Amino acid sequence: MIRTFFKHGSNAVLVAALLAAAIAFARGALHFSLLGVAIGAAVFFSSEYTTHRFLFHAKPTSIPFVLRLQHLLHYDHHVDPAKLDLLFLPLWFTVPVAALYFAVYYAIVRDVSLTTSLVFGSLLALTYYEWVHYVAHIPFVPKTPIGKYVKKYHLWHHFKNEHLWYGVTNPSMDFVMGTYRNVEDADRSTTVRELF
């Protein structure tokens, strides 16, 4: 199970980047900020919802190259939710997004150590997101009640209604944005597998 997780997407690179940053913090090359890590993780968890809803579920573009990227990033994942090659974020997406996070954080705080702590928090949250997403789509029963709930919650998005339940790791932004419903009260969508 863990070996499969590291074979796909950018997961091995994410963990390598986290280990490199952890070593830099441990050796004192960079100052570690626990608050920075927490803020970076919070920023990621907020953007998890908005990225999924407004980028990955955006209407198809008429530009063929961008349309292909839309399919690779998410449309095809809805067509075949169990296919691992479509499950994880690819390296060509993750690296530029991580660089963008670094640039934005640095523009705000103007400190390399604090910026690295913020990015560390965001990448840690992204790695957790990838793990939760992976567990949701493989034949594995989580051990905890929360794990079982989060798996069901994400699968509702794939098999009941693609216009609801955009969070993957937690439903907090769905409550804030009004896209959470009790599963019994939600209409079954006819386009849940073919988004567009």
Image (spheres, helix red, strand yellow):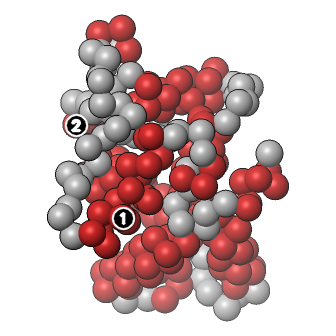
Q: Is residue 58 left or right of residue 69?
A: left
The correct choice, above or below, for 110 with respect to 148 in the image is below
Q: Nearer the viewer, residue 84 or 31?
A: 84
Instruction: Please provide percent x and percent y for residue 71.
Output: 38, 56
Name the residue carrying label 1.
68
Query: Quick check: can you spot residue 146?
Result: no
Mark 1 or mark 2, which has the lower sequence index?
A: 1
Answer few, some or many: residues within 10 Å of disc 2's Cα (few below 14, many 20 plus, some between 14 and 19). few
- Spatial distance from mark 1 to mark 2, Cα to Cα? 29 Å
Q: Nearer the viewer, residue 144 or 106?
A: 144
Query: Residue 188: which numbered mark, if any?
Result: none
Q: Is residue 147 left or right of residue 173?
A: right
The correct choice, above or below, for 73 with respect to 171 in the image is below
Q: Residue at x 29, y 63 (%)?
A: 67
Q: Residue at x 27, y 15 (%)?
A: 187
Instruction: Please provide percent x and percent y for residue 2.
Output: 79, 51
Query: Quick check: can you spot residue 21?
Result: yes
Instruction: Please provide percent x and percent y for residue 88.
Output: 56, 56
Q: Quadrant of the N terminus?
A: top right
Answer few, some or many: residues within 10 Å of disc 1's Cα (few below 14, many 20 plus, some between 14 and 19). some
Q: Quadrant of the C terminus?
A: top left
Q: Nearer the viewer, residue 158 or 71?
A: 71
Name the residue carrying label 2.
177
Three-letter code, disc 1 = Arg
